[in-house]
Amino acid sequence: MQAGHAPCRVRQSTGCTPLPRMTPSVSGVTSVMHIVVVGAGIIGLTSAHALLEAGHHVTLIDSASGPASGTSHRNGAQMSYAFVAPLASADTLRSLPSLLLDRQSPLRFRPGLSPAIWRWCLRFLWACNSRQAMATTRGLLELARTSQQQFTQWRSRHADAQIHFQRNGKLVLYRDARSWEAAQRQLAAQAAWGPPQQLCDASQCVDIEPALRADRAPLAGGVLTPGEEVADCAMVCRQLLHDVRGHPRFEARWRTRALRWKTTRTRAVALLAEDADGLASHLGADGFVVANGVNAPALLRPLDTHLPVAPLKGYSIELPAASLAHCPTHSITDSARKVVFAPLGDGADRRLRVAGMAELVGHDLRIDAGRIEQLLDATHHCFGVIDRPADIHPWAGLRPATPTGLPVIGAARAWPNVFINAGHGALGQTLSFGAAARLCSLIDQGLRPGP
């Protein structure tokens, strides 16, 4: 049991024993299993949705009272299928001293005394080379392509879903010659694997996105990807839950914390989970999916599985379009400021989501007022803020990041029925549907019902 919590009373869960074989299922799965999914953010919900569609029984648990309460709640909203280059790169390594010493830098480093975080930092530095960065980029582009295909299929079945979806394209801005040259090299290197992209000089950037006429900062050039998309991640999560709620093979347990594992020599057979009243249930299942973001390492550690995931803190705000001198129609990324802009909604509900920063400060979710001002300043410099709203919805979240930038999708070491879907970093929404499809395929290939 986790330290700091009162002893819990244990009851046996009903309806959570391994299920009998079904041959065949309508989805082509030769055996149906009961799978517990931990985490109801975008990664957990897409995982649960895919497993249910594959014919399995799914129990979803989350410590919150509803979906998307953590990092999925108010993220940057961009679905960036082409711009997946990792933070760990040779360029980042060269810039690291100045980035860490500048008080206004989008990066902040305060790792504390945790040995796990220091190990993560060393692995991050090791990954800051061109060879690893290109290997990561290629892997992420492949997963992103699958994810866009899966998301498009899902969206075609939900034409009326209220998720503020737009395929509005994305324009990434580069402020100086050095970053602009690096962007051109990156574009050439990934051209064979990624979607079509277009190099734009400064004047072309303004022609493509007239809202940038208010921007007085230097601009060396930009890269346009016409096929990039935006959607409100929390709305997507709620729609996914709506899809599966009421399904006879689905159960959701809210305000329920995963505490510890019950295992045999080679398999996990149950999770002890505590509800809000202090009652605990043994959730027996054939398989388990750990998809609870930055909390995944702690849950897996008792299984001697050390997941290299650290929390990278980011911030967001949201402003009505009417409060801006000019509201962009494209997604915009300001690479120098590490800030993204995503237009959401339409008509009177039209607004601009602004997100950015990357802080390695542990699990601290306090909102730094200085960071919120930086986001506002970036918005003002790019588009002009003519009327600051009383409520700009300041928010902070923790992105579950691996040192290389590649997520961990697959079975835990030595535990063939415990699967991990975590470590997607800032690309969680972008990669979620593809990661769920890959996870489901791995489970159907390798997992068999328990005894």
Image (cartoon, helix red, strand yellow):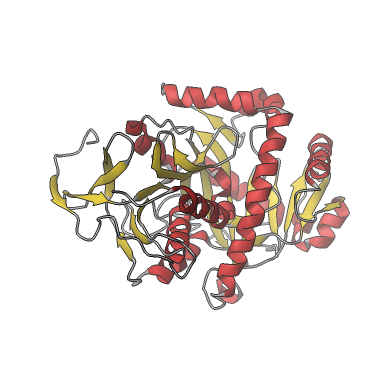
Left/right of residue 386 with respect to residue 255 in the rendered view: right
Residue 317 vs residue 325, the one in the foreground: 317
**Residue at the bottom extreme?**
160
Left/right of residue 330 with respect to residue 243 in the rendered view: right
**Residue at the left extreme?**
9
Residue at image coords 46%, 68%:
239
Residue 381 vs residue 124, the one in the foreground: 124
Q: Quadrant of the N terminus?
A: top left
x then y, percent, for residue 329 = 70, 65
Where is 300 relative to 43, above or below?
above
Where is 436 relative to 372, above or below?
below
Left/right of residue 429 with respect to residue 212 in the rendered view: left
Where is 323 relative to 120, above or below?
below
Left/right of residue 395 with respect to residue 65 in the rendered view: right
Residue 386 visible from this viewpoint = no
Residue 299 vs residue 100, the one in the foreground: 299
Q: How many marks?
A: 0
Residue 224 visible from this viewpoint = yes
**Residue at the front extreme?**
23
x then y, percent, for residue 388 = 56, 58
x then y, percent, for residue 359 = 53, 35
